[in-house]
Every structure is written in structure tokens, then in C-alpha cells.
Amino acid sequence: MLTERGSSFVALQNSLGAPTSEIIIVSGVLALSLSITIVMCGLCQWCQRKLGKRYKNSLDTVGTPDSSRGIRNEKKALKLPAGAKTNTTGGPGQAQSEESDKKPDQRSSVSDLVNSLTSEMLMLSPGSDEEDGHDTSGRETLGRIQFSVGYNFQESTLTVKIMKAQELPAKDFSGTSDPFVKIYLLPDKKHKLETKVKRKNLNPHWNETFLFEGFPYEKVVQRVLYLQVLDYDRFSRNDPIGEVSIPLNKIDLTQMQTFWKELKPCSDGSGSRGELLLSLCYNPSANSIIVNIIKARNLKAMDIGGTSDPYVKVWLMYKDKRVEKKKTVVMKRCLNPIFNESFIFDVPTEKLRETTIIITVMDKDRLSRNDVIGKIYLSWKSGPGEVKHWKDMISHPRTAVAQWHQLKA
């Protein structure tokens, strides 16, 4: 009896021992798997942080709203469709950063980046070589133009046909241009002919023919054919793109000849009109822009005595309407005047993109009308230097941002 009970107990013990070892093995496997999962999770978070830093660096370098030229390059690289809004904060990592951060001030990093870059640009001394290199377009290609010229002896008519242009530079903030051509027979500048404007086109085709009738051949050969390509702007001045001039006594006019000519920088004397130093300060809470006319240098002499009596007019424009005008005092007989006068204009935030500030340096004259020495157009879409100043003003609210500007005709 005892033997049977002992044998049954041993059998029960053996039967219980087998599953116990299996449970131990399974538990060990589960524990090992859990450890591996924890380690892999940690590595994954580490990789995410590293990748996040890489995306941030790529955004810092690609999405910087440094200047209008930089935004154009970015737009080309991203292949944005026509009419699409340019995203100045970058593309590939933006959605990821927004999902991972989800903070109320998630735009602060972008604004800090803009502010830091703008402050670095403002550290350039006025009139320095670096600043001039940034604003001028001496290194970029101005494109070329194709045209034909011929003279009809029976009708005493000079025929000029403007055919097309290629590889014109982008002058607008949107990364394109609206080119047209002015035609002169120098030295006569009063009578000019113009082609139609080709909207948003850097390789325009005009195929327009112009006739200068009643010109004897003896006078034609004393003229210089002058072609000036400009970018049309509805709300501000037209930006010169380039020019071509050909003395008509150097070519055979007995038959129509076709030419391809490289465009050269326009020699309109704008660089000899002088420079103006001014500051802009935008206060978003007060919806106002403060324009401080600081000083000018090397102004063009407009009077017979080799000097000028300059003063500055400041116009606030909204769309194509003049809203408000203010002006400085007149500085007698001075080509390097110091004004230091500030003017406040009310500009709501929603109207900033349609606002233009026109600054005109005038020469006061008692006996005749006042002469224009030069102008500056400040807006969201004007010349590269003007756009840079406008963007710096918006990027640095409540801060006076100063910059030198070349006066233009």
C-alpha cells in the first residue's frame, strides 16, 4: 500500500516537473524579447532625434528667406507650380517638425533664424564692397535680343523689327519678369516706340515691326539705334534689364539684316545720382511704419553753380493710389545733406503686401519747377536691394533697420 502511494507521488512529481521547466524556458524567451524591444525602442528614439537635427539643418540652409534671389532659387529647386505661394520655411521636414513639436511658439525658431540672418546682413557697412556685390547684378546674365534693321530708299523709311529675347533675368519677386522694349534713334530721346508687354516671360517673342517714316538716308546714318529692355511694373517704376546700341552708319541698311546682341547694363546715369541712407521701422501693434530720412551723399548737382538744394518727399501708396505725402526741409547748397527727419504712416498688417513707399529726392528751385534728383521704391516687390530692406523691416518689428540706397531715375 505504501509502495503504491510512493510510486504515485513520484509519478505526480514527475508530471508536474515537466511543465515547470517549459514555463521557465518560455519566461526566459519572453524576458529576452522584452529586453531587445526596449533596446530597439531606445535606438529608434535616438535615430529620430538625429534625423530631426538633420532635417532642421536642411531647413536652416534651404528655407532661409535671405533675399528675393534666394527665394527664386528655392522655388526653382522645389518645382513649385505657377501661382503657388512660396514657402520660405522649407519643405521636406516641416510636417515632421510640426507633428513632433506641437508647441504654441513653433514659428519662433524660423523667426529667430530670419532675425539672425538679417542682423548678419545689416552688419555690412553702408556702401561696402560686400553690400554692393549683393545688390548689383554684374555677375548675372542679362540675356540677349534678336532684331532686324533695314532702310527703304523709295519711301525714306527705316524699319526695325523686334523679334524675341532669351534668358532674361528675373526682376520680380515672383521669380519672373514682364519684359517690353523701348526703341530710340539717338540722340533723339523724345520720340520713342515700345513693344507690347509679355507677362511672366523670360524668353519673350514679340515679332513687332516699327517704322520711322520720313527719314532721309543722310540723317539715318547719323543716328544710333538704341534698344532698352525693361521689366514692366504696374505699381512702381519699370526696372531696366539691359540695352543694345548700334550706330547705323556701321551696318548695311540696303537690306533687312538680323542681329543677335547680348544685353549690357543700362547706362542711364542712375549710379551718378547719389545715395540716400534711410531706416524703416514697422510696429505691428500700432499698425504703423516709421520712415527716417537720415542723410544723402554724392548727390547729383542740378544747379548751374555745381550744387543742389535738396529735400526729400515721401509718398505712401496703396495699390496704385497715393494715400499720404510728407517732406523734409530744404538743405541749401549741399550735395551731402543730413536730414534726420522721421515720418509715421498708418499701415495695417493686411495691407503691407499692397503698400509701396516712394521716396523722391528733389532739388528746390525758386525760378522754375523743382527737379527730380532720384527716386527709391520700397515695397514687397521692387528691386533686390529695396525688397531686402522691406523684408528686414518686417523681420525686425519695432526695430529701425537702416540701409543705403542708390537713387534711380
Image (cartoon, grey):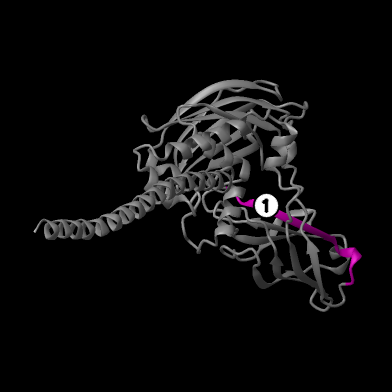
Q: Residue at x 74, y 30 (%)?
A: 301
Q: Residue at x 75, y 42 (%)?
A: 269
Q: Residues within 10 Å of mark 1 (few under 14, many from 20)?
A: some
Give coordinates of residue 49: x percent, y percent: 47, 44
Q: Secondary structure at mark 1?
A: strand
Quadrant holding the N terminus: bottom left
Compared with 5, 333 (above or below) is above
- The range drawn in magenta is 237-252
Image side of residue 336 versus residue 81, left or right: right
Answer whether residue 44 is magenta in the image. no
Answer whether residue 251 is magenta in the image. yes
Quickly name the residue at label 1: 240
Give coordinates of residue 213: x percent, y percent: 75, 70
Closer to us: 105 or 258: 105
Quadrant holding the C terminus: top right
* Quadrant in the picture for residue 366: top right
Compared with 101, 281 (above or below) is above
Q: Residue at x 59, y 58 (%)?
A: 77
Q: Residue at x 70, y 63 (%)?
A: 167
Visible in this render: residue 321? no
Image side of residue 202 versus residue 52, left or right: right
- Identity of the amino acid at label 1? Pro
